[in-house]
Image (cartoon, grey):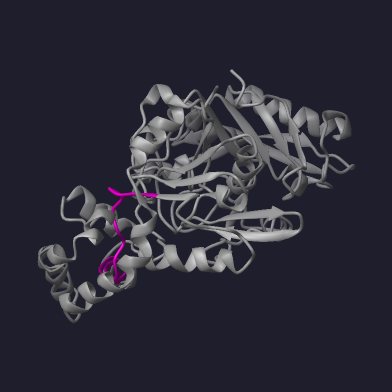
Amino acid sequence: MANVAVIGSQWGDEGKGKIVDWLSEKADVVVRFQGGHNAGHTLVVDGAVYKTSALPSGVVRKGKVSVIGNGVVVDPWAFIDEIERLRGQGLDIGPENLKLADNAPLILPIHRNLDEMRESSNSIRKIGTTKRGIGPAYEDKVGRRALRVIDLADPDTLEDKVAALLDHHNALCRGYGREELDGADVVAKLKAIAPQILPYMDRVWNYLHEAKLAGKKILFEGAQGILLDIDHGTYPYVTSSNMVAGQAATGSGMGPRDVSYVLGITKAYTTRVGEGPFPTELLDDVGQYLGEKGHEFGVVTGRSRRCGWFDAVLVRQTVITGGIDGIALTKIDVLDGMKEIKICTGYKLDGKVIDYLPASAPEQARVEPIYESFEGWEGTTAGARSWAELPAQAVKYVRRIEELIGAPVASVSTSPEREDTILVKDPFQD
């Protein structure tokens, strides 16, 4: 059986939550492998709306096991709060269907503190983070000073480990002119939350290995999008983790050959939250229209998303760097009724035509989109579940996207409802 990785092909917010939820019906295990609780998914199930950020989307389906891998940074308090909130909506969540990697790094109040100091500083370029401590937690992981889930099981060593961590963070506090952090307070909070976290702790790499041997289908759920990847995104306006397909293996403890199909979730137009380059951004009535009709507000932050035309240059590039086999095209219904639709097919940089996004941040800011105009359609795509239900011009738009990005469309999503999907290729079938 095929194991499937779902990743975002743009700057996130492409509609991964619905697609993962839709695919999870066929999966046995759903795995988060990177990011933190800064990326949210909205799931609409039988009219009920569920919002997840720390937990895999699989928690909304009965009989599925959800796994948080070692590539995720975990805020213990946000983790428990989300479990309780979803339980309040009637979901059954417990250690039997939710596993947390024992080697996953923790997000502490220390990290949120540093995130806030940096984003509030006038001397540092603002990245547009959610101020939830994601980046600083990854920094401590790479710096080999992070606390991990397994450390909560050894309370006798917490004081020394927190003290070592504060040697680094309190120096930063002094540099920002802020009050130093109290190690005893941090230790007390960790000891208080530990009994709630530890029942979920597991050797995730081993659990997934046994699931593979048992022939179970595994769905790897990415957060955000490749254009925010720490290596392949619009650096430095990126997140602090990798979200290409290779991270599905690294961030879960499985091997790269255990990921057999990569589905890139791709919005029929383009959006971005936060700072950074955006070649096709529309700062006019059309951009406002896309934002309002598409309900383009962040699940976690509530921030308005910047909106623009579909950028085939960027998606073609992420198809390559992300290892994408096929795309799930989402929110095509937002384009219903538009007389003209544009697709970016290339860029001009200092008078030269190029077909890629440069790695240089100043050059990224200077690229100018080259557009191909496309006739819109009068009918509606909303709720369509077969090609026959789509207006002919909408089908032509989808086919043109396939040509430009060099990847086939595996499915088309026509509304937030999980069943309003046109299936072309089942990712779970070899």
Residue 271 seen from this side:
yes
Relative to 285, is 406 above or below? Answer: above
Front residue (pair 395, 80): 80
**Which percent across, then down, holds residue 403?**
65, 22
Q: Nearer the viewer, residue 245 or 202?
A: 202
Q: On screen, 281 above or below 3?
A: below
Q: Can you tell which quarter of the image residue 229 is in?
A: top left
Q: Quadrant of the N terminus?
A: top right
Q: Residue 165 in magenta?
A: no
Report whether 218 appears left or right of 402.
Answer: left
Q: Quadrant of the C terminus?
A: top right
Looking at the image, residue 215 sits to the left or right of residue 408; the answer is: left
Give x and y (percent) for residue 373. Answer: 72, 35
Magenta-highlighted residues: 100-114
Task: Where is residue 7? Give x, y as percent.
Answer: 51, 38
Q: Residue at x 29, y 70 (%)?
A: 109
Q: Is residue 111 magenta?
A: yes
